[in-house]
Amino acid sequence: MNKLTSFIQEQRQNKPLLMMTHVVYGYPSIEKSLEIMQLMLESGVEVLEVQFPFSDPVADGPTITTACHHALEHQPKLSQCLKDIKQLAQRYPQSRVLLMSYLNPLLQPGFESLAQQMGDDVIGIIIPDLPIDHHAMLAPLPEKGISPVWLLTPDMQQERIKTVLKHAQGMLYCVSRSGVTGQQAPIHDDTKAQDIQSYLSTIKKYTSLPLAVGFGINTASDISSLKGYADVAIVGSALLNTFNKGGLDAVAEKLQELQP
């Protein structure tokens, strides 16, 4: 079985929902971003998503976009980013680490080289601006056991969903609503929460892959509403906003508050 799928299914045997958190490599500095990652892994986060910054992160809202722009001022290198997160993955084997970025920075090394650099430690990759039609270009990654994680949206046409499911591995990233990251998820509204739950239930009819839900997951209540419908809750901008206001201590408190 795929390594990412297997990990999530094993963890889910004893937990109603897992948590995936997001960090921008290089924000506010490379050293501090590594400290944030370490804190999250020590806090028991099951899956860590590390974003390598790009100047035009089209799927991201203002919080993460601003962080990416600041991070780029430190001139981060993708090869060093991979070395750093591989070390973290080896130090915290109870969790799994995924790389997230946009196509442009990843094309520079190419996917053969990326697969070699990611090795056995970074077991998934998320590329929001890569359409499923170009899945074949990622072939070197699954050959090394690295899962390309594809996004689904509530307004996606059924035929498009079927195409994604045909090529999906590891898990599916189910976007809670149209738009960019960081905006409040519609989960706060009971009726709309039911719409998301219905959307997730529909996807489950067609796939046995774990479902991860992100975009606008901010509170313990948001996370609680996903239990029974999703396998992983993804929290990104909410934790970055918390760090910006209160630093590492505030992030530690927020992680405790959000525990499923």
Image (cartoon, rainbow, N blue to C red):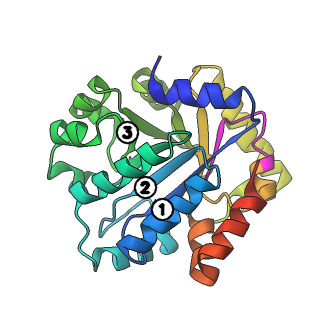
Which image quadrant is residue 18 in? top right
Residue occupied by mark 3: 121
Label 3 crowd bin: few (<14), some (14–19), many (20+), radius 10 Å:
many
Q: Position of residue 9 (x, y in %)?
A: 62, 25
Instruction: Say if 232 sits above or below 2 in the image.
Output: below
Q: Which residue is mark 1?
A: 23
Can you see residue 102?
no
Residues at badges 1 and 2 in contact (C-beta under 8 Å)? yes
Residue type, mark 2 in image: Val
Name the residue type under label 1. Val
**Mark toward the start of the polypeptide (2 vs 3):** 2
Q: Residue at x 72, y 56 (%)?
A: 186
Within the image, what quadrant is residue 215 found in? Answer: bottom right
Which residue sits at x=59%, y=43%? 46
Instruction: Please provide percent x and percent y for residue 152.
Output: 51, 39
Start-end of magenta stretch: 224-235
Q: Nearer the viewer, mark 1 or mark 3?
A: 3
Vertical arrangement, residue 34 with respect to residue 157, above or below: below
Other residues around mark 1 within 10 Å, as few (<14) / some (14–19) / many (≥20): many
Depth check: 216 or 91 in front?
91
- Tell whether label 3 touches label 2 (CB within 8 Å): no
Residue 172 is inside the magenta segment? no
Distance from disc 1 to disc 2, alpha carbons, whole Å, reads 5 Å
Q: Which residue is mark 2?
A: 50
- Marks 2/3: CA–CA distance: 13 Å
Which disc, if any, is residue 134? none
N-terminal-most mark, 1 or 2: 1
User: Does the magenta segment cover residue 234?
Assistant: yes
Indicate the secondary structure of the residue bearing disc 3: loop
What residue is rendered at 43% in x and 78% in y? 28
